[in-house]
Amino acid sequence: MKIIIMGAPGAGKGTHARDISEKYDIPHISTGDILREEVHKGTELGKTAKTYMDSGRLLPDDIIIEIINKRIREDDCKKGYLFDGFPRTIAQAEMLDKVTDLEAVIYLRCSDDIIIKRLTGRRMTTDGKIYNIYFDPPPEDVEVYQRDDDNEETIKERLKVFYDTFGPLMDFYKKKGVFSELKGDDRREIVIKIIFQMLDAIAGA
Ligand code: ADP
């Protein structure tokens, strides 16, 4: 299965992507996670990425396209993949279109007030568990950190960049007949149930 999950920052892409990846046994490819790993390792790519990420801007397409081209050639991608945070521009979508046929593009639509609370309240553990100080506070003995780009100024820029770039991408995938929109505001269990129903129908088709 080849899928994209799209949505504004904080729409829940990463959370649902992990569940989808597990159920359908396909790798979850998050460009944000790949870049954060490079930043963490202190590589040249990581140093470049950090300047963009800290200000909420997108990295140049050629860098992202190279990362994806390399990643999808790995063995685990033979059975499909799930992209999260990619593509973010038409150039990236066109590159992907040349190398693959997508089965579904799922857009999680969320209201702004929920998004702001999810992002400003988001705290995570080093092994990837996500808490939220408003909705799901971490237990006192659990050590959590905040993503460098989850501060108010960068969040504003990330949201602006998302809404500036999303329209053309939505049109691109609508024309291909693979675009579906879901309400991402609801509780995690409700949203993932709907996603699974949709993907089960595609997988069984
Ligand atoms: P979010 O959707 O929460 O903003 P991501 O983890 O997907 O976060 O991305 C974090 C940052 O990484 C982005 O703000 C951007 O700087 C960079 N990035 C991730 N994916 C891409 C991409 N496909 N194209 C360009 N930049 C990207």
Image (cartoon, rainbow, N blue to C red):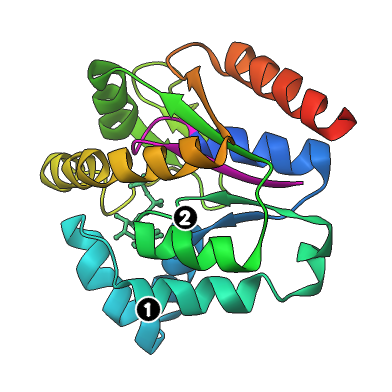
- Residue 113 higher or lower than 24, as above or below: above
- Residue 62 badge: 1
Reply yes or no: does residue 106 show up in magenta. Answer: no
Say which residue appears at 74% left-offset and 75% top-offset. 74
Residue found at the very far bottom of the displayed protein: 44
Q: Is residue 7 left or right of residue 79?
A: left
Which stretch is magenta? 1-12
Q: Nearer the viewer, residue 130 or 192?
A: 192
Location of residue 65 in the rendering, given as x and y in whole percent from the top left corner: 46, 73
Residue found at the very far left of the displayed protein: 153
Q: Are the residues at dot 2 and dot 1 in contact (C-beta closer than 8 Å)? A: no
Q: Nearer the viewer, residue 173 or 22?
A: 173
Say which residue appears at 55% left-offset and 70% top-offset. 68
Reply yes or no: does residue 8 show up in magenta. Answer: yes
Report, in whole angstroms, how far the alpha carbon at label 2 lies from the one at label 1.
Answer: 13 Å
- Residue 179 higher or lower than 22, as above or below: above
Ligand 1, seen in the image, is in the quarter at bottom left
User: Badge 2 is on which residue?
Assistant: 86
Location of residue 182 in the rendering, given as x and y in whole percent from the top left corner: 51, 19
Q: Nearer the viewer, residue 71 or 123?
A: 71
Any part of residue 141 in sight: no
- Residue 34 badge: none
Question: Within 10 angstroms of label 2, few (less than 14), some, or many (20 or more) residues?
Answer: many
Say which residue appears at 51% left-offset and 75% top-offset. 67
Location of residue 82 in the rendering, given as x and y in whole percent from the top left corner: 65, 49
- Residue 54 higher or lower than 174, as above or below: below
Question: Three-letter amino acid code at disc 2?
Answer: Phe
Q: Residue 40 appears in which quarter of the rendering?
A: bottom left
**In terms of sequence position, does the residue under pointer 2 or pointer 1 come before the other?**
1
Question: Three-letter amino acid code at disc 1?
Answer: Asp
Q: Is residue 196 left or right of residue 57?
A: right
Q: Nearer the viewer, residue 34 or 159?
A: 159
